[in-house]
Image (cartoon, helix red, strand yellow):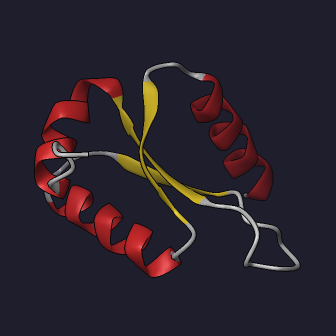
Amino acid sequence: MKNRWTALRTKLIREPEWVTIFESRDEYVVRIKHMQLVEADIPAVIFDQRDSSYQAFGYLYLKVHQEHLEKAHEILNLTHE
């Protein structure tokens, strides 16, 4: 199962169609925004790039497919940023 997830994760990172819509060091903020997108039927993925030993280093990235980018911005009220 882990190898399958790693392969999927690597594929999504390399595909230019998946773009980062939000990043934060606070896991709860990213998870809330992820839930908002999922509830609106927008596929979204969280990439945790924090250090495994010290969670204070690194970011979590919320990615969506390019075709859903505009709608995702509207839902997350990020159009002003």
Q: Which image quarter holds the C terminus?
A: top left
Horizontal relation, residue 21 to residue 36: left or right: right
Residue 76, quarter of picture: bottom left
Q: In this view, which residue lies farthest toward the top?
A: 16
Q: Position of residue 15 (x, y in %)?
A: 56, 21
- Using the image, determine if residue 7 lies above or below residue 37: above
Name the one closer to the observer, 69 or 1.
69
Name the one closer to the observer, 3 or 19.
19
Q: Which image quarter holds the N terminus?
A: bottom right
Tell me the residue at 57%/33% (across/down): 12
Tell me the residue at 76%/58% (across/down): 2
Horizontal relation, residue 51 to residue 35: left or right: right
- Using the image, determine if residue 31 lies above or below residue 65: below
Tell me the residue at 45%/30% (across/down): 18
Q: Position of residue 55 (x, y in %)?
A: 74, 78
Q: In this view, which residue lies farthest toward the right?
A: 53
Tell me the residue at 32%/45% (across/down): 43
